[in-house]
Amino acid sequence: METNRQKKIAGILQQDMAEVIQRLLSDAGRSNIVVSVTKVRVTADLSLAKAYISVFPTKFANGLMKDIEKMSQQIRHEIAQRTRHQFRRMPELEFFSDDSLEYIDQIDRSLKGVDNPIEHPELLQRRKKK
């Protein structure tokens, strides 16, 4: 369970990280990509922050995540400059691709498609344990 301090630090990091990443990408000439920081989790000792990044359009996600990993020290430095009066120590940053929107879209497509168990109950017979 997260403490209030962890939640506050995660919120500050999420907001600042989104602004820094978006600015770095626009400086690099990638202005047609939308990047959002969907979730930040901070460890109990406040030494590590795991950031989950969502990229739209998703076809650029893999390349962009590699670029963000390369820029992680620069991102950490800029966030540390912004939050120097709020944090004693800036946590290390780890970035992960957040594919939850893609997962939700896949479930939505399967419910609308041929394999919809609500419209085709015979599919449930195939899935029962024998």
Image: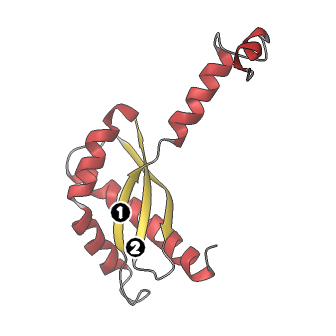
Q: Give the image quarter of residue 110.
A: top right
Task: Identify the disc placed on residue 94.
Answer: 1
Q: Position of residue 62 (x, y in %)?
A: 30, 40
In this orientation, does residue 122 appear?
yes
Q: Position of residue 25 (x, y in %)?
A: 27, 51
Q: Give the image quarter of residue 34.
A: top left
> Residue 27, relative to residue 75: is it above or below?
above
Q: Secondary structure at mark 1?
A: strand
Q: Which of the colour schemes (rainbow, by chain, secondary structure, one colour) is used? A: secondary structure
Query: Quarter of the image containing the N terminus?
Result: bottom right
Q: Residues at badges 1 and 2 in contact (C-beta under 8 Å)?
A: yes
Q: CA distance from mark 1 to mark 2?
A: 8 Å
- Is the residue marked by circle 2 packed among few (<14), some (14-19), or many (20+) residues within 10 Å? some
Q: Amino acid at mark 2?
A: Leu
- At x 33%, y 57%, the residue is 21
Q: Is residue 105 left or right of residue 20?
A: right
Query: Quarter of the image containing the C terminus?
Result: top right
Task: Identify the disc placed on residue 48.
Answer: 2
Q: Give the image quarter of residue 79.
A: bottom left
- At x 53%, y 42%, the residue is 100
> Residue 104, relative to residue 47: is it above or below?
above
Q: Is residue 39 left or right of residue 4?
A: left
